[in-house]
Image: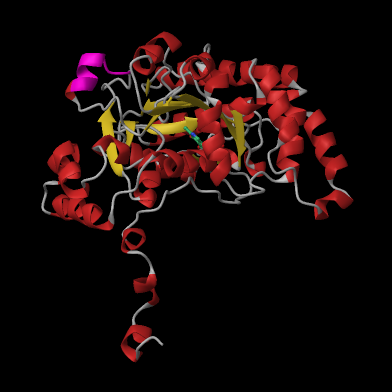
Amino acid sequence: MPTRTSREQAPRFLVRPIIQKLQGYVPGEQPRISGLVKLNTNENPYGPSPTVIRALQAAINGRLRLYPNPTAERLRQKLAVYHHCAPENIIVGNGSDELLALATRAFVEPLSGLTHYALQAGAHAGLGQSIKRKKSAVVGLDGALAPSRYAVQYLNPGYSLYPVLAAIHGAWPKSIPLRKDFGLPSRETLRKSGWDLDAALTYITTPNAPSGRGYTSLELEQICARHRGVIVLDEAYVDFGPEHALGLALKYPNVIVSRTFSKAYSLCALRVGYFVGHPDLIDALQKIRDSYNVNGLGQVAAEAALDSLPYYRKNFQRIMASREHLSQQLRRSDFEVLPSQTNFIFVRPPRFPAAVWLEKLREQKVLVRWFSSKELHQFLRISIGSETEVETLIKAVRAILRNTEA
Ligand SMILES: Cc1ncc(COP(=O)(O)O)c(C=O)c1O
């Protein structure tokens, strides 16, 4: 029986301390404001293909009461044909987010509570960075396993979910800086920054988010070829660039490529993503996922998307053309626009701070994304909308500049 005192405690004390302290992932806003031009979460401005819509409509029938296929078997078979590999190389997830989280649970050893608190206490005392970088601190505290077994390593800036996944799992987060221009650091610089070839799990966002910068598969291979821990190449935006690195997942047994149907295939709402990698790694993830992790309509839609690739390829071309047009127009208005291989651009606006631009654009009913961190706060991330939305944004920018002329 709980004592009177423990029952009177605030319920939050019933939550594990590491979760109490956790800063959860902050997704972009999803407001429902009529007339709002929503360019903040990198959704595709064009809908799914007519084939997908028809397949979904046909699937809304008596079978909704039944569980979906537990392993997304047909979708995996189709993906295997598409990627010239075996279905055993593929796991499908409830969005790629689910798979990124499963990877932490399958490959990374959580720190014991004691070590975790010691690292946190170090952080409080201002020792965080030095302690976090010191393998010996982790070995000394946790003892039994090599420190790399606890490490979730990622290049920063990258997808801001990675550190949250590490924190949820109670892993050792290792943030390694990209170059100032968001390029991949040389091997030598990586080594000096503490890059761990044995880190249990390493995430690389490629093309990079939020900068949009693309990396060649040659550059990525230079990192993967020498690596010994698991590397996930997160290719969420790969369809909007000239190159992909899927071959690396089939060449190196420790490399996984992550893909999603959310962005390029306009299926954010249905939550379908997948990993391609060595069957041993894929099998480990299959063991720990929920039994029916991918909903039935999502499976139907993703299969139909693979049957309508010409439709989607046209959309990719259209989005890339709009991206170049928007970049050019913003450069004319004195924005610094970074080269992008994604369906968004990363820009440093002129005249006043990016956070002020965020609000001024919002007043004009255009929503973009701003990140407050020290590396990113001078920039705005703008998703590429439809041609009409892009023109609305350009007009809004010009109006703001006109209205604030000295
Ligand atoms: C780099 C990156 N990876 C993965 C995801 C997650 O995609 P999904 O919708 O498949 O969960 C996102 C979503 O914003 C992303 O930006």
Seen from the viewer's position, the closer of residues 93 and 334 is 93
Say if the magenta span includes residue 189. yes
Quarter of the image containing the N terminus?
bottom left
Write the residue at 73% across / 28% down.
Answer: 305
Q: Quadrant of residue 37?
A: top right
| Residue that sits furthest to the front in the current view | 144
Q: Specify whether residue 329 is painted magenta.
A: no
Q: Is residue 348 visible?
A: yes
Place of residue 309 in the rendered image (x, y in percent of width and height, measured from the top left): 72, 19
Q: Is residue 305 left or right of residue 406?
A: right
Vertical placement of 316 versus 374: above or below? above
The colour scheme applied to this rendered structure is secondary structure
Side of 223 where 369 appears, left or right: right
Residue range in magenta is 184-191
Magenta segment, prevailing SS (helix, strand or loop): helix
Depicted 201 relative to depicted 331: above or below:
below
Specify whether 67 is left or right of 189.
right
Q: Residue furthest top?
A: 218
Residue 16 lies, in percent from the top left, at 36, 64
Tell me residue 113's x, y (percent).
27, 57
Residue positioned 11% across, 49% down in the render: 126
The quarter of the rendered structure image containing the C terminus is top left
Q: Position of residue 235 (x, y in %)?
A: 50, 25
Vertical comparison of 122 with 95: above or below? below
